Amino acid sequence: MEQTVRTLGLNKHIALVAHDHCKASLLEWVKQNQATLEPHSLYATGTTGNLINRHTGLTVNAMLSGPMGGDQQVGALIAEGKIDVLIFFWDPLNAVPHDPDVKALLRLATVWNIPVATNRTTADFIIQSPLFAQPVEIAIPDYQRYLQARLS
């Protein structure tokens, strides 16, 4: 598929997701990076978003809980170009009933070429990168050109 460019603005739109066994770790990470995260727009699946809001006071746009469709809601925002970074502390050792949704979320983040952290170290690398503090152009699929070619 042809590529085009999208700019991740100075104010990033960050999705925060965590499996049950990883929620405490993500909450601790958010608390340690609260000053860095505060100027950005935060989104999260339901339980995670409510925990972050309650324990930090950060404004979080909470979706549904992951198993109830929250992962798919975040994925839809990624596909619409409304999420710039995905921080997803997932538990690779614990099967979850909504595993297909989790895989779809990670697939969409890859398709739309946004930075993804699936653990604390990668999350630290992302927010400490000089690129995090500036607008960045990323290559994304040129879906409009694809549609025009298919319909011609």
Image (cartoon, helix red, strand yellow):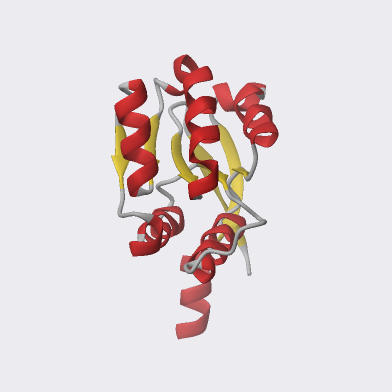
Looking at the picture, tell me which residue is in the foreground, 80 or 73: 73
Residue 152 visible to the viewer: no
Q: Residue at x 51, y 26 (%)?
A: 28
- 108 relative to 120 in the view: left or right: left
User: Is residue 67 toward the left or the right of residue 137 in the image?
Assistant: left
Kindly give the residue lying farthest to the top in the view shown. 35
Instruction: Look at 51% across and 60% down and name the residue there.
Output: 105
* Camera-side residue of 24 and 75: 24
Residue 111: x, y in percent?
59, 61
**Would residue 10 be seen by someone viewing this image from the given angle?**
yes
Whole-percent x, y for residue 151 in the image:
45, 84
Name the residue rendered at 58%, 64% in the picture: 95
- Quarter of the image where the N terminus is located: bottom right
Residue 38 point in image, percent of width and height: 40, 20
Q: Is residue 85 above or below residue 77?
A: above
- Please tell me in which quadrant of the rendered image residue 55 appears: top left
Q: Quadrant of residue 115?
A: top right
Seen in the picture, residue 141 relative to 9 is either above or below; the reply is below
